[in-house]
Image (cartoon, helix red, strand yellow):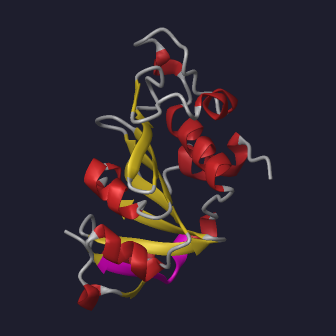
Amino acid sequence: MAFTHADVAWLAEDDELGDLWCLTFVRGVSEVEALLRLGADQESIRPLTYDKLIDAGLFPETVLAGRVGDWTVLIEESGWACTEADKAQVLSAGTVAVAVLRHDYASDDFVYAVDGELVTYFNPKIPEWRHGSDPDRLNDLMREAGLDPDGVPGTGAEAPSVSGALLLAARLTGAVLPPESIRGPLMSGVVG
């Protein structure tokens, strides 16, 4: 399926999840396994709705996990653990992990990790500054998503930062988090 910006607009443009969140897609592992890889305490894993997470102030320590096709999606409200190098490496061991961080007060991030290796990671506002073992691997997909990997450094402020990163994630994974999915209940675990 050829995803477009319209498919990710509810996350990129609306404030459904607020101004600080991280979505991480992990292929072929269960919700519980993904939470355990992230460091969740086994005893804390239980079903939870997004509204209960917010109303009870359980974030950022509690992470939600749901399924979209063959992917588990980790939802960090006001958190960004999945974009940290060590966490991305553990999450992607034997599989693939793709993370998108929206952080309106600092910097957004995009992470693509395969089998424990950080392949490509960058700030979507300055996609020309990429890092990783193969920072150019996603260049064609980045262009299609509106993230110019060849731009002049420091001039990417007008790029569709979060929207482009979410679209890139959708095209890499073949999965988009549907709006109704965050209402849950989802699995959750305390990781902090």
Which residue corresponds to the image point at 66% horizontal and 71% vertical from the top-left? 69
User: Left or right: where does residue 112 sit relative to residue 5?
Assistant: left
Q: Residue furthest top?
A: 152
Q: Is residue 162 magenta?
A: no
Asked if residue 186 is among those painted magenta in the image, a careful observer would answer: yes
Give x and y (percent) for residue 33. 41, 79
Residue lying at 30% horizontally and 37% vertically, measured from the top left? 105
Looking at the image, which residue is at 46% across and 78% down?
31
Judge left or right: residue 36 versus residue 10: left
Q: Report whether 85 appears left or right of 99.
A: left
Segment colored magenta: 182-189
Can you give x and y, in whole percent of width and height, for residue 134 in the image?
A: 47, 33
Residue shown at 67%/47% (left/top)? Answer: 171
Asked whether the viewer can see residue 72, the reply is yes
Tell me where residue 34 sits by quadrant.
bottom left
In this orientation, which residue lies closer to the viewer: 54 or 125? 125
Q: Quadrant of the C terminus?
A: bottom left
Rendered position, 34 above or below 3: below
Q: Nearer the viewer, residue 108 or 26?
A: 26
| Residue 122 position within the rendered picture, expressed as x and y whole percent measured from the top left | 41, 33
Image: 49 above or below 20: below
